[in-house]
Image (spheres, grey):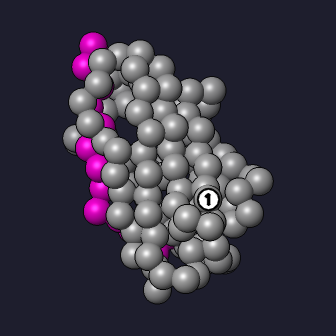
């Protein structure tokens, strides 16, 4: 089993950057596909970015393409989300999540708040 802990959120101004980290405990981190999700007040949770086990295949929501980058370091059991050119619409609680092959996202972190002021 893997446990996930996010960090790196905060209050920034529009145009600033943040890097979120998600540290995973357990020895099987490299067996999981990882994703970053976010949920803004009054909105449904949405997927932001995903990364496959090797780190070579990534996908992004249209709203963050070209601004956010997901990466992982399997040696450090960590997945990252580099967020550049932040906008007020990026304000949300950001969660990392893990899933095994052929499964839905079943492991979730506690979330980290990102607030972008205009």
Residue 40 seen from this side? no
The location of residue 76, given as percent across then percent down, is: 55, 64
Between 91 and 12, the one nearer to me in the picture: 12
Q: Where is residue 51, by image quadrant? A: bottom right
Residue at horizontal 42 percent and vertical 45 percent from the top: 20
Q: Is 82 situated above or below 29?
A: above
Judging by the rendered image, the residue that carries numbered circle 1 is 73
Residue at horizontal 35 percent and vertical 16 percent from the top: 14
Circle 1 Cα neighbour tier, 10 Å, few/some/many (<14 / 14–19 / ≥20): some
Q: Residue farthest to the bottom?
A: 1
Q: Is 115 situated above or below 117?
A: below
Residue at horizontal 40 percent and vertical 75 percent from the top: 3
Q: Residue farthest to the right?
A: 56
Q: Where is residue 108, by image quadrant? A: bottom left
The location of residue 58, given as percent across then percent down, is: 69, 49
Q: In which quarter of the image is the C terminus?
A: top left
Residue at horizontal 48 percent and vertical 81 percent from the top: 26
The location of residue 107, given as percent across then percent down, is: 43, 73
Whether residue 112 is in magenta: the answer is yes
Whether residue 14 is in magenta: the answer is no
Q: How many marks?
A: 1
> Which segment did they paint magenta?
105-118
The answer to whether residue 62 is left or right of residue 22 is right
Residue 112 seen from this side? yes
The location of residue 15, given as percent across then percent down, is: 41, 16
Q: Give the structural element (helix, strand or loop) at label 1.
A: strand
């Amino acid at each position: 089993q893997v446990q996930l802990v996010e960090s790196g959120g905060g209050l920034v101004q529009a145009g600033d950057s943040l890097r979120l980290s998600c540290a995973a405990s357990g020895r099987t981190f490299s067996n999981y596909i990882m994703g970053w999700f976010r949920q803004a007040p009054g909105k449904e949770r949405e997927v932001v970015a995903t990364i496959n086990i090797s780190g070579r295949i990534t996908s992004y929501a249209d709203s963050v393409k070209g601004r956010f980058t997901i990466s992982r370091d399997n040696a450090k059991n960590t997945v990252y989300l580099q967020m550049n050119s932040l906008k007020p619409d990026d304000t949300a609680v950001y969660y990392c999540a893990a899933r095994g092959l052929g499964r839905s996202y079943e492991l979730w972190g506690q979330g980290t708040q990102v607030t972008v002021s205009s």
